[in-house]
Image: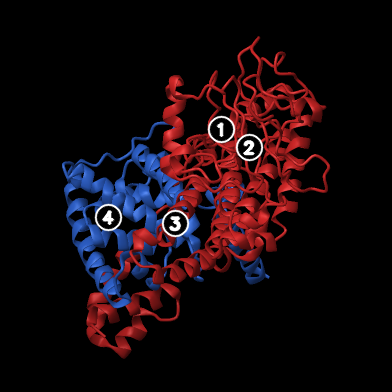
Amino acid sequence: MKREERVVGYLDEIRAGSLTLQEVATRSPSFQCELEPLVQVELKLTALPKTIALSEPTKARIRAQLMAEMREPAPAGRVQTWLLSWQKFGHRLLQPQALGHLMVRPIGVAVAFFLSFSLLGVGTVFAAMDSLPGDGLYPIKTAAEQARLALAFTSAEKADAYLWMASSRVKELSKIAESNRFDLAAKVAAEYQHSYGEAFRFASSPEQSETNFHQQVAVVQTDLREIYQKAPQDFQAILAVTLSVTSPGSTAASQSQVGTPPPNADRTEHEATPANGSDPVTSGLPQGDGGKVPTDKSGVVAEPTPGKTSPISSQPPEIGVSDKFPPKGDIGPAPGPVASKDTAPTGSSPSDNTRTGPVSDPASSAPSDITPPKTGDENETTNNNLDDGTKVKSGVIQGIVDRAPSVNGGDSTKR
Amino acid sequence: MREKAALAQEAEIVILVEKSIAGDAESFGQLYDLYIDRIYRHLYYRVGNADVAEDLAAQVFLNAWRAVGRYRLTGRPFIVWLLSIAHNLLVDYYRAKRESTSIDDVIIPSSDADDPVSLAEKSFASAVMRQAIRKLKRDQQVVVVMRYIDGMEYPEIAAVLKKSEGAVRVILHRALVALRGIMGKDVEGLL
């Protein structure tokens, strides 16, 4: 121990009262001369006022400022930023092309699983299930969804995972409707649309028949329909625009507005033949048929032009069915006056399947099985067609009609 | 009895800290109520300016709130963590000032009625001592303030300064020796 340390040690003992200067002088005479003036300095230091403090009004003012700052989304943002960064990290890990080797994928799966459940805790994840976008726990919820997706190795499992995500979005829409937080509706509806489309994209795999995918689809659609029917008109409008909702109950001639579907649907009207004489457009939503998705075509019409004939589905709002294969990034409202009648592209070349997502290709055939997922190129083509009305085939009238995914029909073996 | 009360308060603080870590603003507000005076006092003795000390104190708690999610209970008093933030803020503060203001130019708060330090200013001895502290080297100054104003233990000071306890004791010894010299000169000058 250095001499300085010993001096300070003596000072501490003297200050504490466990030692006196005389005792130090007796024990270590060489320290006495040095200690005496330092004890005096220390006495003055300890005598310094400890009552220095802010005035109460000043403290209150700073506190108010601090609380105002704290109400900013800093903590949540901090958590969210942290979680989102990990989410992005997980996403990157899960991208085989980014890794360059499929063998690394299990590591990503492990990381995603670990992050979602081990770090955060199962309880936290479950608590997050009730969160809405913008809530502090919402990133945990999406991380858990990504973890489940990461653990889905087969197409059927992926379809189930995406459908689960779509179901979560439906529950969120329900809460949004209850809490009148309509500002969140468009975002959640768009995410629902994406997840729902992805579910059907992967549902084209043969092993899908081994799951209860079809029943789950019916449940999701039923829930969404109930939300839509019970929702205030403003909320219905948001859902209608975002999800290209069919205006049920309205005839082709009378439908002039998206998002105001009457609650009751007429199956007969729904199967009305479009003006161009092509195949009738039907809704792909389950209509009390045991929860099974119809095997025929579906129709969802968006933004039809008033006064024109339209192959409008008269079903209840079949939100999302038309978005069986929504092009990525195209999750907004369906294109306006452009309309098409969707027929199944089975057997046709990819170039024929230029209508994806909310817009169908009226020229393509309509098989009763699940339409194979469209590629990104196809989606791009679709968008081009939308932008260029001249490319829309002659069968297009108005509204956006899509074929419903038929996953349980007699042709299911084609999958 | 007194120990029981202290333990109870410590437990209460731990709960408040845990809640703050979880993002409970109200709990953090209570920690503010508990520690604002000590933080302000520390800063005041370090910078010697009531306004600057007030601004820095507010900033300490804001920074603490932003970082409290990463705080981990280690058994060390929460105030030590706050003082670490204050110390880092002061380092930045002095760096920003680039030492353009000499220690001698640091304003000693006047005795206006709004200044909470005005009463303390009446004490000549304490005024001389505060002046003397600000004339110390930076590391000596912080050790003296932490030891005699904040009442921190050596391990806590060492943790804040990222030095060994022995090094802290050596710095303190040199500070006391320097203070003795400074005070002697100042008192002679003033008289």
* Residue behind mark 1: A360
* Residue behind mark 2: A403
**Residue A276 location, x and y as percent?**
62, 21
| Mark 4 neighbour density, 10 Å: few (under 14) some (14–19) many (20 or more) | many
Classify A134 as above or below A99.
above
Q: Tell me the shade of chain A.
A: red
- Pointer 2 chain: A
Q: Earlier in the sequence, mark 1 or mark 2?
A: 1
The amino acid marked with disc number 3 is His
Q: Nearer the viewer, mark 3 or mark 2?
A: 2
The amino acid marked with disc number 2 is Arg
**Residue A405 location, x and y as percent?**
65, 44
Q: Quick one: SS at disc 2?
A: loop
Q: Residue at x 64, y 65 (%)?
A: A122
Q: Residue at x 45, y 49 (%)?
A: A81
- Pointer 1 chain: A
Q: Residue at x 44, y 56 (%)?
A: A91
Tags 1 and 2 touching, CB below 8 Å: yes
- Pointer 4 chain: B
Q: Which mark is residue A91?
A: 3
Q: Relative to A163, is A109 on the left or the right?
A: left
